[in-house]
Image (spheres, coloured by chain):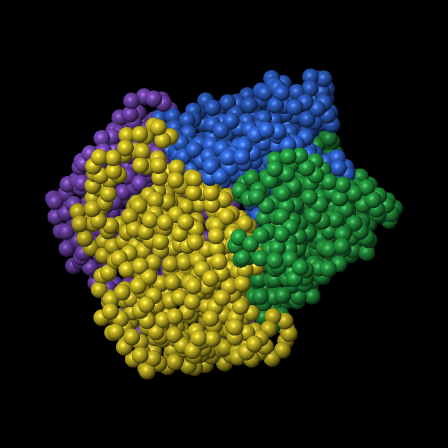
Chain colours: A blue, B green, C purple, D yellow
């Protein structure tokens, strides 16, 4: 079994659809649990007006009954609450009707220009509606289910903003302050940096500019041995990086020390393995590896950081070309957020949860939560037995 | 059609096998072409003794006849030239025979410890033989075929070292100096940095330590529109990052400006689109995006950087635990390279070539080189016609 | 690019969702086109009362604008028109509420018993709601889009019933009577057999029994060379068989002569290749191969037959065990159709269309209909040139 | 985790390569075990001269050490023992050298003609070398490893010929006579039919003709619940049919009663569920379903039958066209077997074993044999507890 998810939906279309396949049966879920993450995604200083309209909520279409998953595909619909205002522009049918809100001045940094070339379109709205970061709401819904599964096994996934618009937060371990980032308007754990980030955002808004930043995601409570070293596409680091780099506007991913590890000697990078003493498992003398060695979880907290470039739609628009005339123009100004970095962490948590839940299902199988739990518990006992001298008994 | 590749083989086993599926028929290939990249992977200041033994060469097993691909799976064998010395230790059969060269003191930073836990082994050699970076030779062979295909379409893929052991090279565009990196003992294009890097390597060797670094890969000659914005797993940035982060010891990946983009305002990040004038296509006023927007190639050079941590096997070994006793110990010292950063670029080139060739086959299809070329040419003409006013004619 | 589709939804849930990914942009589509196939699936003598309630229709959720595909995932929702009567029984939330319409007497022949064991459920409704053949409506919607694409290339896919309840129809080539099967109450082309089939259905209904049958699907207008001989999972015959055998209640699949080919000598099976004369392509002296040789289309009509067992819910129920008591019982009688064989052809057409559209996209690529058409036309010209002596010119 | 396998190699090339990925570590294997199935594939009345040359044997390249799998990809090489006679004809390099043994008269029924069109070749040898059934040897090697895994869980997979050249064997349950088919020259269990089949083969050889037939594969010892009803591509019946129909020359697949089920009423098809009494699980009052309901194993023996058309190379060749002249000709006569039906069962066993092992890994996970066994045992206990009233205790 493997966890798969599929999203569909345009930004101003009827809504977003997410289908999640491969969850075990018997997992307790509620819409409230999913909506909570959808709500978290919408907050943050620096968002424009649209966020207040949306109030994303899922409707269950399938796969859940009487509060539990059935093992069948779980489909969720997130209706677009602004649909009434867009249904003519985005109508599926009415071929040949004059198109409103046509976009012919592609925004540098966005999919607009390349998309119209690749898909042979004349209206960049046909591209930007899908390339929009709105699609990440559908991923957050999928990730909330993955997180629900992880939660049954004591695995937590948290995030916080470590840099925004060039302001760098001081080092804080988010595991020491669970949930605290959600109380910050920029989802950072450093109060001093928080104030500076808010200021920077306000200044950028005044200048019609946009800001990027860096987010850190930390997952804790993992068993060692998720992922694998045996083949390139089973390595968990690659799977995480692939998933995270697919978030719109993300241009960098690093694990543990990341790029900083490249500048240090090996003696200052690798985490010593410290004998546990008695019947205890060995522990690590650090976590520079960010919880991943050889493409597998080590059991230490998983630490990933991703860099987001500034949003591509500037209110002081950049130079571009008009698709209909071929002449120089100013880019479209479709939307008005200054930064989406606070939301990025919520999206990244969801994707990390999906990758980890998938890796757990891959290793442990399980068609029901009961079965999966039994398999996980058996593995944990096997690991404990290795150090307790009862190894053969546990087999 | 999609390009797939599969590798197999242990570091000191009989050899490595690579199978590449999905290449069009009629592509001219030679063993010499593939061996050239295998040779490039083995060089570089900082490698230990083994590299001189190996002299990797492929033997064709299938998929090629009379100098051309057949469209069927191409299998290549890279024999291990040191096999005679290892055949007892690594024998497939002889169950129960006493095991020589058992590894019970796992190296921090490597797959050793997690691997024995996950796969329930008592000898970490059962893990490290596959987790070894030797496997990347098999990937380089696969990548050489992908590069051969790209070569037919004028796409080049190059790399150079931009940092090693903390020494940062000055900015050089590798497209200005094709092939030059291969003449440097550390594959860098900055002669001053080169000297410092060599010194740093020699010092690390003397200290029994290891070094990491950063490599940049640049691909040129691409059509716009490889990859897609429509679904997370079709985005080219995610596919590149996933592939590159799966290289052993790589802990970071960034595209274009990467992490640096997170600190700048949008007005200084996004690449303006400059009208071409007359019937010319528009061009970009910069390439901060690294040739990728919305998960698609823009047609500008693709620029990716990856960070490699220092090698995990130190001659001054780190603290670990002995698997057989559970007591504290010093880690195994299996191998003696100081750094593999110069080789990393060759590996990364291969993987970038595989991702790009796959994306081209996905977009253009084609069972023969003839057919693929016709499809690519047709698309190029379609793009040109858009700006020349002859768009409808080209349909 | 590859065509993927995902379905979700329970039989009496809120509705069915279908997501189709990978269609080129610019394909003209209408809900009417899709609904037409949904309507065809619901007809046929032998259906019970539910079919008249349903009147399946799709609502576009995404991927289509102004009458054309956008290249993004196309999501369709088929609402369950009987939802008002089921919303308490099938409610997603309300954990712990007493469950109505619990099913504890699993039906032999259905997924009920194995499903509750595998997924660790106590109410077989948790299984049967998804295992129900109602899910095929979602596949028909997906297939209608695939058929729309094929239609642009002159490929047609038709079906007719060749046996029902033991009555065998006389041999008719459905290509000679396009659309005729839809005018028969049992979707057969032999009027005599039709009358006997209707009678057999009426008799089975009176006896509380159910009936199966055999359906033939024929696709015409295909280029030679879809699929491939090179690897097992690229062979088109395997891909067709895998897709078709996944239809609920299908127990057999055969291509061309099928099982009958096993009893004849080779000299009476293989289709001679007849020289075309002049500049014409060669033609076949028969089509016993059913249009597939070596896992590839030959260009002759594709002919597939599938066998459906009788429906598993009998009004005169079979012996079973009660899950709650472990004692002998009579099986649940959830639903009242006598046979679904007439509808089976419509489902099978949809799945054949999906496999063929996927194979075309695999071979020809294409992000827009324009691009795909250019690539297909180029290939057709290449084939024609081979026999006309202008081969080199066409390259 | 999922079991994947990849094959490569041309019929008269250097050899065949098989790579199997996803086996758990710690599985005892020997070359002898694999070679035994390779040997079984080569026997059978009706094979030509080549079979005696071959004596296929594997060489381990990777993934196995000290008699056990390592969890890493297992690569096996089956050298072509006739390579010395073919190395010039099949040489990978030597581009432009005159080609010996060129094939320009494509054989009806084989991939020859379509292959040269699709892949744009002028020598059909470029196609037939890969389309040859010789490739099935590589699949048999992969299947032998899958069977080794199943063997650890008490799952057996056997086969026998039920029809050959129109001679139909009497019904015998192969589970009653394990291994007996291998003692028959045509791998049938009915001695009378055996004699008639041998005669029929001799007569066909005399006539320069070829024969097909039908093979039945039976797997026993399966847990209920492999595969799934939830999505089309997780259904085990579809996965089996897809795999089996990809065998060269197979034109039909059926499960359980198969096509015969289509002619009977439901009351005579579905297998009653008989209460077990006391604490015993219920059992089935028949196995018309062939061990599969709702796309899942029921726990009853899995029964699949496949139909093979006669071989495509006739010594009395069929009409074809010469590719170089476009004129009518007699087809190539590359090879001289009369029938491969006896070998077909061995190939089909291998593929069924691969599908079942994959389904077990999907359901149970497991990186080591120890872990997988613990998970399987836990599930078996869970099932037993359901009927014993100790259900909650077993959770």
Describe residue D201's horizontal placement relative to residue B230 as left or right. Answer: left
Q: Identify whether C179 is placed above or below A164.
A: below
Describe residue C151's horizontal placement relative to residue A267 as left or right. Answer: left
**Residue D48, horizontal then vertical, whole percent:** 40, 77
Residue shown at 25%/38% (left/top)? D280
**Residue C368, horizontal then vertical, whole percent:** 53, 50
Nearer to the camera, C234 or C144: C234
**Residue A210, horizontal then vertical, whole percent:** 69, 29
- Looking at the rendered image, the quarter that the C terminus of chain D falls into is top left
Residue shown at 68%/34% (left/top)? A272
Nearer to the camera, A20 or D169: D169
Give residue D47's quadrant in the image: bottom left
Tag count in the figure?
A: 0
Observer able to see residue B178: no
Describe residue D391's horizontal placement relative to residue B171 as left or right. Answer: left
Residue shown at 65%/23% (left/top)? A173
**Residue D381, horizontal then vertical, whole percent:** 35, 36
Residue shown at 53%/57% (left/top)? B93
Q: Identify whether A210 is placed above or below B244.
A: above
């Amino acid at each position: 079994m493997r966890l798969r998810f599929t999203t569909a939906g345009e930004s101003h279309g009827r809504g977003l659809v997410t289908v999640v396949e491969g969850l075990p049966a018997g997992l307790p879920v509620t819409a409230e649990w999913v909506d909570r993450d959808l709500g978290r995604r919408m907050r943050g200083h620096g968002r424009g007006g649209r966020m207040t309209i949306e109030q994303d909520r899922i409707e269950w279409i399938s796969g859940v009954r009487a509060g539990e998953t059935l093992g069948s595909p779980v489909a969720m619909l997130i209706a677009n609450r602004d649909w009434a205002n867009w249904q003519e522009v985005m109508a599926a049918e009415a071929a040949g009707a004059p198109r409103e809100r046509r976009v012919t001045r592609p925004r540098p940094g966005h999919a607009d220009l390349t998309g119209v070339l690749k898909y042979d379109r004349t209206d960049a709205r046909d591209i930007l509606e899908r390339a929009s970061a709105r699609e990440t709401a559908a991923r957050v819904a999928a990730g909330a289910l993955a997180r629900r599964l992880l939660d049954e096994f004591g695995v937590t996934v948290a995030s916080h903003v470590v840099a925004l618009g060039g302001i760098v937060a001081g080092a804080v371990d988010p595991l020491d302050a669970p949930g605290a980032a959600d109380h910050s308007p920029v989802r950072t754990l450093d109060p001093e940096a928080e104030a500076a980030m808010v200021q920077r955002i306000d200044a950028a808004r005044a200048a019609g500019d946009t800001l990027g930043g860096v987010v850190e995601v930390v997952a804790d409570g993992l068993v060692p041995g998720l992922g694998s070293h045996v083949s390139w596409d089973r390595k968990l680091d690659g799977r995480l990086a692939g998933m995270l780099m697919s978030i719109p506007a993300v241009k960098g991913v690093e694990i543990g020390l990341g790029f900083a590890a490249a500048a240090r000697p090996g003696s200052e990078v690798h985490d010593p393995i410290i004998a546990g003493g008695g019947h205890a498992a060995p522990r690590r003398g650090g976590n520079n590896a960010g919880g991943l060695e050889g493409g597998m979880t080590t059991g230490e907290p998983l630490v990933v950081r991703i860099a987001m470039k500034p949003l591509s739609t500037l209110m002081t628009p950049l130079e571009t070309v008009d698709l209909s005339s071929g002449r120089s123009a100013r880019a479209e100004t479709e939307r008005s957020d200054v930064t989406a970095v606070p939301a990025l962490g919520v999206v990244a948590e969801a994707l990390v949860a999906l990758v980890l839940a998938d890796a757990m299902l891959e290793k442990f199988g399980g068609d029901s939560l009961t079965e999966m739990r039994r398999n996980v518990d058996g593995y944990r006992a096997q690991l404990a037995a290795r150090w307790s001298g009862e190894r053969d008994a546990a087999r």
